[in-house]
Image: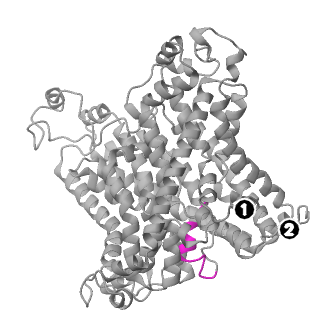
Amino acid sequence: MSSTDALASQPSGPRRSTMPREVARRRRGGGPPPGGGAGRGWHPMLGAGLLPRVLSVLALILMAGVWLLPLAWGVDTSFKSEVDASSGAGDWIPAAGFTLAAYREIFAQGNLPVWALNSLLIGVAVTVLTVVVSALAAYALSRGLFRGRRALLAVTVASIMVPPQILIVPLFRQMLAMNLVDTYAAVILPQVVAPVMVYILKKFFDAVPRELEEAARIDGAGSVRIFVSVVLPLSRPILAAVSIFVFITTWNNFLWPFIITSDPTLMTLPVGLSSVKDSYGLQNAQASAASVLAAIPLLVVFMLFQRQIVKSVATTGLGGQ
Amino acid sequence: MSSVPTVGGPAAVDGTRPSAKRRRRGVPGGGGPSADGAPGGVKSRGGASRGAGWPFVVPFLVFFVLFLVVPLGFGLWMSLTDSSLTGNGDSTFAGLDNYTEAFTDSEVWQSLGNTAWFTLLSSVPLVLFALVMALLVHTGLPGQWIWRLSFFAPYLLPVAVVTQVWGMLYQPELGLFNTMLKAVGIDGIGWVVEEKYAMWSVALLTLWWTVGFNFLLYLAALQSVPDHLYEAAALDGAGAWRRLWSITLPQLRRTTGLIAVLQVLASLKVFDQIYLLTKGGPAGSTRPILEYIYDTGFTNYRLGYASAVSYVFFAIVLILSLAQLGLFSRRED
């Protein structure tokens, strides 16, 4: 069976055994499993022993701790005075005590909210455009609604192999010729091309049952009507997955917005923050405060929509850095 | 391409597997009554309704042509000229000059070598750590969301945030890492300022930042390993280690192949974190090929030459993709 087909189809956590506990226990040679009671003694991967469990718990705590350390350090630094952050010897507790000065400075300079708003606007625009444009094309490709679908499908799938980064040079020249450098349009439009998403959506539509569509067609509904009121509602999970994925990717995209914008009021968060870092040199506390503020929105979104995000990464099964 | 085998239908989302019959009917040309868009299930091969789908496709086609096909072709043309960033009509045809220059340019070879070195340094741990994390989290300790957040949160951070925090951790004199090393009596090292350590530091940052994605893929795959396999093995007296080696890892083989393919392709495209953390230094020891393309095009204004190097890189990615795809699909059979 295809393991990826079943990705995310199960709720989190190990699946409960389907074999009656009693039978399993008796066959294991009688006697209740150590720790018995309510069938909680035995774990599919770890078995019944205490040692594997203790070791895995310790390893998990250790690893999670290591992974959280850089985040904790960033947050810690953002609450230091600039002197402590830039000259301290890596102390967690600053000599001059914790302070909100860095945050006050960041808000006083005022660019961060603009960048966050730009990131949000651009992220939403790219996501909406990509999902609409890709879903329409994917539906037509899936249902064979036009001539030349085989050719278009082949070209689309082949183009997945083009690394978008190699297009920046000609794209920049194109934008120059179209007089679009330093505009929202120039940031947004090239990011809408997502052959991968067309392919994912097409695969999904392929498996959507036709009966409802046929019924709607008999009732006299046209293709557009059927797509909007029959197919799209059935496709909510995959549309959510694709949307979340496109949004995260766009929100964090650096190279293209970095190249095409030089006006600070047009910059996205990653681009704006990198310019702060450049101009401030070693202003660690302020840069950290800005980083904390920039990190909060997606972390909040993640905590709210954890399940859907986990699913979306698992179902779409692709991504980059 | 690499994503092709991974994609599931609705089965992947709602857990219900569409019947094979429906799948077959979904195959184009398979003769599903509505496949032609003809009303009432009447088949009309080549009928008027065959063109009815074009309005659906046109928006995508416009974007696809304008922002993928045109730049791809334009870039190829530019790579044959000496066009620069300034001025529009002053470029002259240069034939294959740019390509011959690229092949003799030691900086191209160095940055390609850096890219390959980074890909090797980052890919292996990015697969292994993701696997270990997923195995640990899957053992079902309470507070699942905390563990998932710990490992996945870095993936959500903008690159500028990641490089800012790690830049502080890596600072030679004041950085947390060297402070911790000194506390246990080890001399600090020049994480990003010494040539021999810089690429390792970049790979370490990348591991921390992006491993969460692979971790989620592994976690999802683990959840689909049926429990009865473990039970059967336990009845045969297999211990925890034995079950890991004989059941879990073999069941994850497909996922591992997929993650490895995706990871290599992602690592080859490294640019952002290196540009922001080290600017490619010290002494060009971390500069990847994409940064060389960026520098050539946007700092030295040699767009034609930058395009030629882009195409050399594209050719390499293409060859590797196809090779991996072949390897990957053969392993599946």
Mark 1 Cα-neighbour bin, 10 Å: few <14, some 14–19, many ≥20 = few
Q: Where, by quadrant of the figure, is residue B50 drawn?
A: top right
Q: Amino acid at mark 2?
A: Asp
Q: Which residue is mark 2?
A: B82
Task: Specify how the rendered protein is coloured.
Answer: one colour
Q: Gap in Å between the C-alphas at discs 1 and 2? A: 22 Å
Q: Where, by quadrant of the figure, is residue B329 drawn?
A: top right
Q: Position of residue A106 (x, y in %)?
A: 39, 78
Which range of residues does the magenta coloring cover?
B269-283
Above or below, A79 against B84 in this view is below
Direction from residue A140 to residue A230 in the image, left or right: left
Chain holding disc 1: A
The N terminus of chain A - image quarter: top left
Q: Position of residue B183 (x, y in %)?
A: 30, 86
Residue at 35% across / 63% down in the picture?
A: A296
Above or below, A62 against A185 in this view is below
Would residue A172 be counted in the magenta stretch?
Answer: no
Chain holding disc 2: B
Would residue B276 be counted in the magenta stretch?
Answer: yes
SS for tag 2? loop
Q: Which residue is mark 1?
A: A179
Mark 2 Cα-neighbour bin, 10 Å: few <14, some 14–19, many ≥20 = many
Q: Main secondary structure of the magenta part?
A: loop
